[in-house]
Amino acid sequence: YQIVGGISFYQRKEVKDLMAYLKLIVNQKDDIAFERVINYPKRGIGAKSVSDIFQISRSESISGYEMVSNLDKYPEFAARAKRIKPFVEIIEKYRTEKKEMALDLMVQDLVEDINLIEELKNEDLIIGQTKVENIEAFIEGVAEYVKNNTEANLESYLADISLFTDLDQYSEIDDKVTLMTLHAAKGLEFDTVFLVGLEEGLFPLGQATMDPMALEEERRLFYVGATRARKKLFLSSATTRHRFGEVESIPSRFIKEIPEELVEKKDRRQNRRYGVDSHAVSQASFFSKKPAMSKSSTEGVHYDFEESEIMRVGRIVQHPSFGRGKIIKAEGFGESLRLEIMFSGLGVKKIMAKYAKLKIVG
């Protein structure tokens, strides 16, 4: 396969920052990585301190990290040591743990230890959330790497990633599957196109469903992707998606907007983990509440809402105990969908949608 635009993900600041930590854990002589993260997230180490560190390290022909690892030798840094030592402790901790922990778990722990998610959330609401999702995607990528490499370690991962990002070359002639973003696909055509991840909260993005203009932009992108196909277009969504916990997915509204006579709907999910006969669901309707099941099945996949009944801001719902109310806020999707509903005479209630037995009435 070949990747078009793959390098862009690893060039995003938040990803480069996390990668710099990983590089420094492996190589304490990497001054570029050291300078990038010595004060990120912010820990009160200013530009003057960084300059002083490098002035000393270069005069002694050692790296910046090697210098701060031995701060007791430098009395001029006594007042600044309490801000620098916690950083050194983190790097030293993971120099040890990279030999003992699974790589994906180590990266998750590192993200928590440096409070990276909180740092990103403190940025602009939309941009910060996008960056958080990029870090989540990075961690999921590491987990996938571990799954596919029985002897995975941090050194091999960094080496493989450096090769992977060099694949940012597109050839129309090569007999390969081409992986690309919708933006990168503009102007190109292929005999067969697969659009994957067509799920509410992913495409369209959860935040876009709250903004008509943003939703229209997502719809336009879907059109761009769909019209790249000369002969065949495959649209797919996952039954469940692992995003810091497995959640049930709802097929994207964009699929249902296509005229039915143009679509051949098939459901080829393997549902053994849910106790469903895998042969019985092969022709189930893509939008049915329950896939067809054999009579012997005692447990099945279920969807809390029809695709056309997606709980979104502005909808009027009926709750069995609280009565009628209006959705004023929605977060998450699938089984993780959380709602804030204004009920008449009761005020705002925070509710997990999957437990609420809500009925849409308007």
Image (tube, helix red, strand yellow):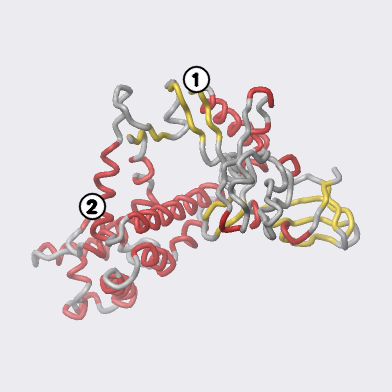
Residue 34 placement, left or right of 259: left
The correct choice, above or below, for 106 with respect to 251 in the image is below
Quadrant housing residue 315: top right
Instruction: Choose between 148 and 88: the one closer to the eye.
Output: 148
Q: Secondary structure at mark 2?
A: helix
Identify the image quadrant of the N terminus: top left
Q: Which residue is mark 2?
A: 159
The x and y percentages for residue 170 are 31, 28
The x and y percentages for residue 284 are 66, 41
- Residue type pointed to by label 1: Lys
Q: Alpha-carbon neighbours of circle 1 within 10 Å: few (<14), some, or many (≥20)?
A: few
Q: Secondary structure at mark 1?
A: strand
Quadrant housing residue 142: bottom left
Q: Which residue is mark 1?
A: 231
Cβ–Cβ below 8 Å for labels 1 and 2? no
Instruction: Say if residue 304 shows up in the picture.
Output: yes
Number of marks present in the image shown: 2
Residue 241 placement, left or right of 160: right
Q: Earlier in the sequence, mark 1 or mark 2?
A: 2
The x and y percentages for residue 327 are 78, 51
- Residue type pointed to by label 2: Ala
